[in-house]
Amino acid sequence: MLRSRPVHLAGPENFELQRGPVPDLEDGQALVRIEMAALSAWQGMRTKDFKNFIRPFDIGELISCDTFGRVVESRCAALPAGAAVVGRQGWQDYAAVRPEDVSLASDAYTAEEWLTALSSPGQTPYLAYSQKVRPMPGETLVVTSAAGAVGSYAVQLGKLAGARVVGIAGGPEKAAFVRDRLGADAAVDYRAGSFRDDLAAACPDGVNLYFDTVGGTVADAVSEHLALGADILLVGRVAANNSAEPERDMANLRHVWSREATIHSFNRYAYK
């Protein structure tokens, strides 16, 4: 449960463990044992008291998240005992659900795959690319937070589309992961003192598509290398979400304007 609102990043002091009985079932319900729960950036946003695309958690409210579980008891024909399901329950051991609360999950995929590639982390770049702007073969795609849950799939899907992908990550280990494991053509460490020079070297012909989940000073740096007619996929603002300071206006609009770039905002939760 949410115990208090964090000023900056949420910590153990902001949450409270509550114990209670396993829920009793009503007709049409099934009891699901939660086997795996996902941690996502939007959960952190919801611990703070400001309006966003989704309402903040109330104090004392269960922290909801994408979950994978298995039906252990059922009073619903559509959800038989033993069935694997995915849904948005929460940080809990058991949940009483109805068919509209969950989807049946094929055992052809693991719990990890259901909560990553087949859930928000994989769906976000897939939908952003398919519904907003597609990476084009040979063009330069820059992905921020490229070692993260969403960014790692944005990198791989960009490579599958034939783009030249440059990933931005924090630290040499993450940069190496983006380049060597995810297959990016280049990876840049935004924490390095040479970040701006490294980014310029990685994008000699400019940036055609920018997949931005971070904003802040990283976005400012990327904007300096936008190609004429570039596209910006605005997917998230992690830099602001994790900061105690008010979000500032974009300092890079001058570059967006001068390069005739187009900003495409994308919200995963607008798509069912």
Image (cartoon, rainbow, N blue to C red):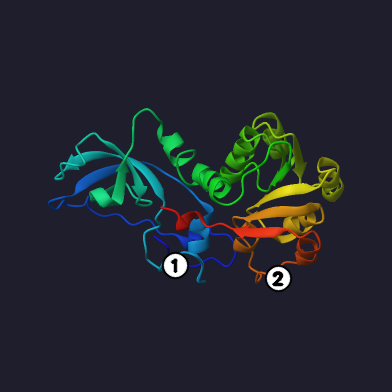
Q: Which residue is drawn at 12% across and 51% down?
A: 27
Tell me: 9 left or right of 177.
left
Q: Residue at x 46, y 56 (%)?
A: 269
Which of 93/85 is in front? 85
Q: Position of residue 76 (x, y in %)?
A: 16, 45
Label 2 residue SS: loop
Question: Which quadrant holds the N terminus?
Answer: bottom left
Could you say which disc has been placed on residue 55 in the image? 1
Q: Disc 2 designates what residue?
A: 249
Q: N-terminal of the two: label 2 or label 1? A: 1
- Residue 136, relative to residue 100: is it above or below? above
User: Mark 2–mark 1 contact, CB under 8 Å?
Assistant: no
Q: Position of residue 159 (x, y in %)?
A: 65, 34
Which of 29/266 is in front? 266
Query: Which amino acid type is marked by label 1?
Result: Arg
Label 1 Cα neighbours within 10 Å, binned few <14 / some 14-19 / many ≥20: few
Label total for image: 2
**Image quadrant assignment for residue 142:** top right
Label 1 residue SS: loop
